[in-house]
Amino acid sequence: MRQTTSILCQIFTIILISNSVFAQNNFSLQLSNNTNYAKYGESFSVKGNAGAPYFVYHFSTDFMPAPPPMVEDANLGNPMVVDTSFQVAAEETVLVNKQGLYYIQSDTTTKDGKGFIGVAENFPKYKKMKNLYPTMVYISTQNEMMSFIQGERPRLAFENFWLNVAGSPDNAKRLIKVYFERVTEANIKFTDYKEGWKTDRGIIYIIFGSPDTISNIDGGIRWSYNSNLNHGQVEFDFLEEDNQFTGTHYELKRSYDYKRIWFDTVKKWRNGTLQ
């Protein structure tokens, strides 16, 4: 018990000290699908020094979806919680039996390590309702989200939502197809320490679609959309940030100026006119 407590204290200390020196990684991760995520029931292994111990931490944190682009203070979220820690040897096969963030270190006195996310079995293309509901947070009211998640008949609430916004069954099918294809694409393209649909690029991709042009800017990339709802060209800048768990991470340069274009585009989703 004392050893486990000591390990947990170490990892929290490592996370909170932002000016710690990063050591050079001396190992790599092998995932079943060669991505930065592993589905529930798949496995991973550490490629490193034979006989050396590697320390694995699992965070049960359910990371929050990205807030709308006009919300400038976007750093609030759930606290990081380690619920499991254990040691593995190089080449040892480890079963992914939990969803959430896995973080592996060879030296717990530094911030250096590698991570990946454990995801649902039907990731990246969600099929189960319990996975579909949360992704609708970007176009739904709080009451609607509660009806999806806690209502007595969530599937009916889901169907009624799309019928109400679409105005007809055919248009509802079209909108559902567009929305959840974008969710799937966001999961494939942008997943890092959390599911792609929850990331800054994910939220913009789902609501606005694929950008018309992508260009490099100082410190990141720019997504440009041509004339939209008489707003003229709209640009979103994503800056590269170092992420302790999964390397490079892109964060949206947020601005209150996005408020009008955001609400106007969400309105197109909610009145069934989005193309």
Image: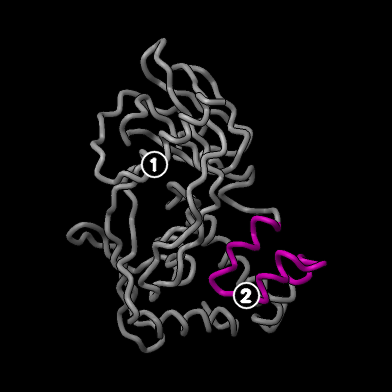
| x 50%, y 61%: residue | 65
What is the secondary structure assignment of the residue under circle 1?
A: loop
**Residue at coordinates 51% horizontally, 54% vertically from top-left?**
63
Question: Residue 179 at what x, y percent from top left?
Answer: 56, 67
At 39% from the left edge and 29% from the top edge, which residue is drawn? Answer: 105
Say whether residue 200 is visible.
yes
Q: Which residues are magenta?
A: 129-157
Q: Is residue 55 above or below residue 126?
A: above
Between 95 and 109, the one nearer to me in the picture: 109
Residue flagged by tag 1: what amino acid is it? Phe
Toward the top, the furthest residue is: 51
Tell me residue 107's x, y (percent): 34, 26
Nearest the eye: 45 or 222: 45
Residue 19 belongs to the span the image colors magenta: no
Three-letter code, disc 2? Gln
Q: Is residue 63 above or below residue 105?
A: below
| Picture quarter with the N terminus | top right
* Mark 2 nearby-residue class (10 Å; few <14, some 14–19, many ≥20): few
Expressed as whole percent of the image width and height from the top left, the position of residue 256 reads 34, 80
Pointer 1: what residue?
245
Question: Pointer 2: what residue?
Answer: 142
**Which secondary structure type mostly characterizes the magenta part of the structure?**
helix
Q: Earlier in the sequence, mark 2 or mark 1?
A: 2
Residue 158: image tag: none
Left or right of 203: which side holds 243?
left
Q: For numbered disc 2, what is the local secondary structure?
A: helix
Location of residue 104 by image quarter: top left
Question: Could you give the CA–CA distance between mark 2 and mark 1, rounded to whole angstroms?
Answer: 31 Å
**In the image, residue 149 lies in the stretch drawn in magenta:** yes
